[in-house]
Image (cartoon, rainbow, N blue to C red):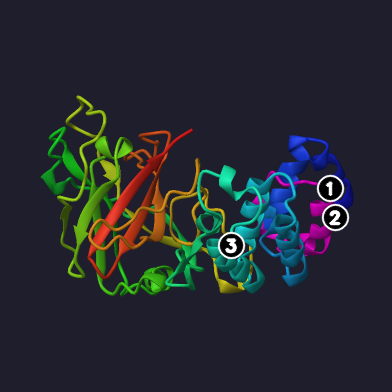
Amino acid sequence: MIPELIRRAAAGEFAAEYELEQLAAETPAALTPHLPDLLAADFRFSPKLYRTAGDDLQQAVVTMIDEGAPDLNALLLILAHTRGPVAENAFRRWREQPPPGAGELFIGPAEYMVEGGWMLDDGRARELCGRTAYALRPDPERTVEPPAQGECPWCRAPLWTVLDVDTGDRRVAEALAHTGWNGRLRIVTCQGCHAYTTLYSTVSPDGRSGLSDHSAAPVRVLDDQSPPETLRRVPGELLTDPGMSAGGWDMTTPSIGGHPEWIGDAEYPACPACARTMDYIGMEEAQDPEEEPIAEGTTYLFLDASCGLAATIYQQT
């Protein structure tokens, strides 16, 4: 079955590629033995399939890159998703000695690591995402999230409380463990303007939050100054844990923790206070009291616990 799927996917059949991606997410161990065949078939269009690649396959990709194999961009993305020590050492080396063809890339080879949710920080690998994630579901009491105190300085709309959780809840503590945060985490943003700029908010363990002066003016300001009410979200079922390997990393539902499913390129913001890349903490989609989406895109949430700053980034198709 899997060899046939690989053959069809390599021939450009989208349905086969989709089935392989489902296998990689739900039963990664079933696909792992076939990854060398996938690479030999020159199937490089879905780097997420290679997340469980072992040292031998990682080394094979590194060798291909060092020898100047074509499609350097795709090979670097594959290696970024494998996340192993072989990949880490190669990315570290390429920061000083770029591989053939690196001069034609838009970013440095090591910068591809963020597509897999990690990076080199002071020469050491650093995880940008949590390994445990929970769904964010509407409050069973169907509590409507009240407008946050304060208003957007550009469109004058009430601020939106995009997330309000507390590490006193075991699920929240697990999902945010990689950030070092402890206490209540409430993040506000402007429901309209955050689609046109990265908005930063100040956060405090007692739940205080407000729009930060570090936020830049949006390139477009909407006229609607009365955004609809949204349902309050609370942690729900477990989506992934450290024992699930690649499965569950691709969150397509509002969630806290885990790895993002990017609509576009990976977009981890730098903390405006210290310039450190911020930790990913979840994704949200605003819904009205009838659970209807308010916008078609996804809001990605980030945190720098040390500086007490959070960020919201919006992407849509």
The image quadrant of residue 230 is: top left
Circle 1/circle 2 CB separation < 8 Å: yes
Looking at the picture, how far across and down is residue 188, in whole percent? 23, 51
Kind of residue at disc 2: Asp
Is residue 247 visible in the rendered structure shown here? no
Q: Which residues are magenta?
A: 25-47
- Element type at mark 2: helix
Q: Nearer the viewer, mark 3 or mark 2?
A: 3
Q: CA distance from mark 3 to mark 2?
A: 29 Å
- Residue 32, magenta (yes or no): yes
Task: Give me the disc on residue 41.
Answer: 1
Residues under numbered marks 3 and 1 in contact, where contact means CB atoms less than 8 Å apart: no
Element at label 1? loop
Which mark, residue 97? Answer: 3
- Where residue 266 appears, as percent x and y from the top left, is 48, 49
Q: For the residue marked with disc 1, what is the amino acid? A: Ala
- Name the front one of labels 3 and 1: 3
In this view, the residue in front, 169 or 206, is 206
Residue 295 seen by the camera = yes
Dot 3 or dot 1: first in sequence order is 1
Residue named by callout 2: 37
Picture residue at 18% right of the left edge, 32% below the top: 226
Residue at 39 percent across and 36 percent down: it is 292
Q: Amino acid at mark 3?
A: Gln
Residue positioned 84% across, 52% down in the render:
40
Q: Give the CA distance from mark 3 to mark 1.
A: 29 Å
**Local secondary structure at mark 3:** loop
- In front: 145, or 272? 272
Residue 205: in magenta span = no
Q: Nearer the viewer, residue 70 or 242?
A: 70
**Label 1 crowd (10 A; few <14 / some 14-19 / many >=20):** some
